[in-house]
Image: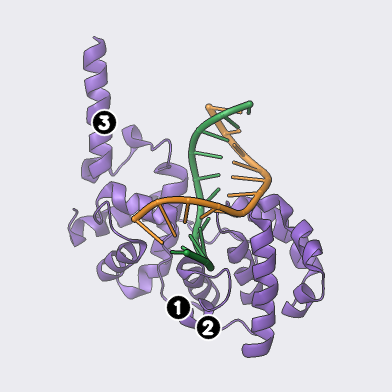
Chain colours: A purple, B orange, C green
Amino acid sequence: MLTKQQIRCCLDVMADMFPNAHCELVHRNPFELLIAVVLSAQCTDALVNKVTKHLFEKYRTPHDYIAVPLEELEQDIRSIGLYRNKAKNIQKLCAMLIEEYNGEVPRDRDELMKLPGVGRKTANVVVSVAFGVPAIAVDTHVERVSKRLGFCRWDASVLEVEQTLMKTIPKEEWSITHHRMIFFGRYHCKAQAPQCPVCPLLHLCREGKKRMRKRENKRARAD
DNA sequence: AACTCGGGGCA
DNA sequence: TGCCCAGAGTT
């Protein structure tokens, strides 16, 4: 396990590697962001952006989404996968927005999590990106990076990962930090092909050092 | 804690 | 062409 000091050091390196880290979802307001993040569950932001381009021209308000048959909305988002669940959730979510929140996206994380299709990760992204509330959205990238480097135990829950990061990072940097970690995880510390040999964090990384040792042993046996 | 839902993308 | 990727909800 890394010390707080070491974790901050890792995060500083990520900041240097990805100075332009940001939310990759295309949106123009909190409502569009909410829809985009709900759609992004279990698929990549790039894929969602392909769909939302057309979607946000056709549907502009919560009313627009519920004015259409479920099957039509399903067809409009078919290419992203899990589209039946997502279409159903979005119609219910829009109905709730109208009935309970005056058609506005709530600014409170716990209120957001009452909406169908909105879990902890989605709610954290929405409050931090749309409303500037400090939050750390733990997706698979943030979780994988935290565990490989040794920010937390391997068996830590998503909530424990979030709490570890919150305890380590000053509040003002929570939001930008989670974007940096996502970039680091997506483009460098990838799930299948981590770039350990060229990683500037290798000297601190629990998993990286283990992988490099394995590599060495393999080479030694081959000789 | 484990399972399910479903496509696109890449090897 | 088959494996890998990405969260929320349910039991």
First of labels 2, 1 by sequence position: 2
Furthest residue toward top:
A223
Protein chain holding label 2 = A
Label 3: which secondary element = helix
Label 3 marks a residue whose chain is A
Report how far apart the C-alphas of labels 1 and 3 lie in the structure: 39 Å
Location of residue A97 by image quarter: bottom right
Q: Are marks 3 and 2 on the same chain?
A: yes
Chain letter for the residue marked with disc 1 in the picture: A
**Height in image: A124 above or below A153?**
below
Contact flag, marks 2 and 1 (Cβ < 8 Å)? yes
Give the class, few, some or many, for how many residues have Cα within 10 Å of label 2's Cα (few <14, many ≥20).
some
Kind of residue sitting beneath label 2: Arg
- Which residue is disc 3 drawn over? A212
Q: Which mark is residue A107?
A: 2
**In percent of the image, x 71 and y 50: which residue is there?**
A79
Q: Secondary structure at mark 1?
A: loop
| Mark 1 on the same chain as mark 3 | yes
